[in-house]
Amino acid sequence: GSINSVLEFSLNKKSDMNLVITNNRENVVDIINYAFQMKEESNLKTTFVSLGKQILKNDIRIHLLGQKAKADIGGLYLSQPNSITDYNIKVNHLAKKTLSKQFFKGILSKNSKASFTGRVKIEKDCIDCKSEQVNNNLLLSEKAQINSDPQLEIYCNDVECSHGSTTG
């Protein structure tokens, strides 16, 4: 079987959310869309763990709407043989003093494929924003494949951003 889901979260002012999401199904196609709307001083900590023998697409959208909103997104994917894992993340900084972190690690075995696309967009006049983005991958076979594409789109001065990707 397969799953095609949409999950929407709205974090009110000064709210906290700690979320752990595990994907470990076998022989299925899962397409899951997550959307987070974050107001002033809200805090999101989300960890994604993908362990299954499946085709998995996680589409994650985070909108930092209020000042001092913070999103910390992490993930680990352990790709089994012949599996396909795709993380597509877009973080939009739409207010001043917002913070986002993305830290994803992948370990890929033979004939598995994974992709990580992480885009951070900081809009005009969103000063004092901070963003960190890291994607580290370990290929256990010459037949494993990873496509890592961290992106920054910045339309404002006075921000602090970093991104990086490693594959070994």
Image (spheres, grey):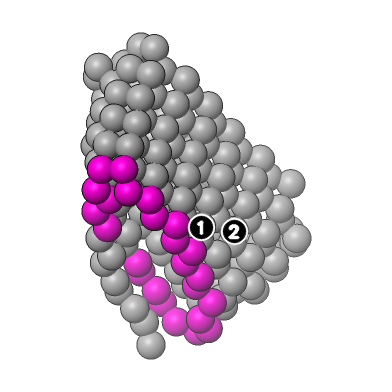
The percent coordinates of residue 43 (x first, y second) are 39, 45
The percent coordinates of residue 16 (x first, y second) are 38, 51
Question: Residue under circle 2?
Answer: 76
Q: Residue at coordinates 53% horizontally, 83% vertically from top-left?
A: 26
Instruction: Report the magenta residues as a range.
Output: 9-32
In the displayed structure, would residue 86 be above or below residue 39?
below
Identify the amino acid type marked 2.
Leu
Instruction: Classify 10 Å Cα crowding around label 1: few (below 14), some (14-19), many (20 and above).
Output: some
- Circles 2 and 1: CB distance less than 8 Å? yes
Q: Quadrant of the N terminus?
A: bottom left
The answer to whether any part of residue 156 appears in the image is: yes
Q: Which mark, residue 74?
A: none
The percent coordinates of residue 134 (x first, y second) are 57, 39
SS type, badge 2:
strand
Q: Residue at coordinates 41% horizontally, 77% vertically from top-left?
A: 29
Q: Residue at coordinates 27% horizontally, 36% vertically from top-left?
A: 40
The percent coordinates of residue 70 (x first, y second) are 40, 39
Foreground of the two, 84 or 63: 63
Question: Residue under circle 1?
Answer: 47
In the displayed structure, would residue 114 be above or below residue 31?
above
Name the chief secondary structure element in magenta: strand
Residue 3 location, quadrant: bottom left
Q: CA distance from mark 2 to mark 1?
A: 8 Å
> Is residue 13 found inside the magenta-colored segment of the image?
yes
SS type, badge 1:
strand
Identify the amino acid type marked 1.
Thr
Mark 2 or mark 1, which has the lower sequence index? 1
Residue 135 location, quadrant: top right
In the visual, does 63 lie left or right of 115?
A: left
Q: Residue furthest bottom?
A: 1
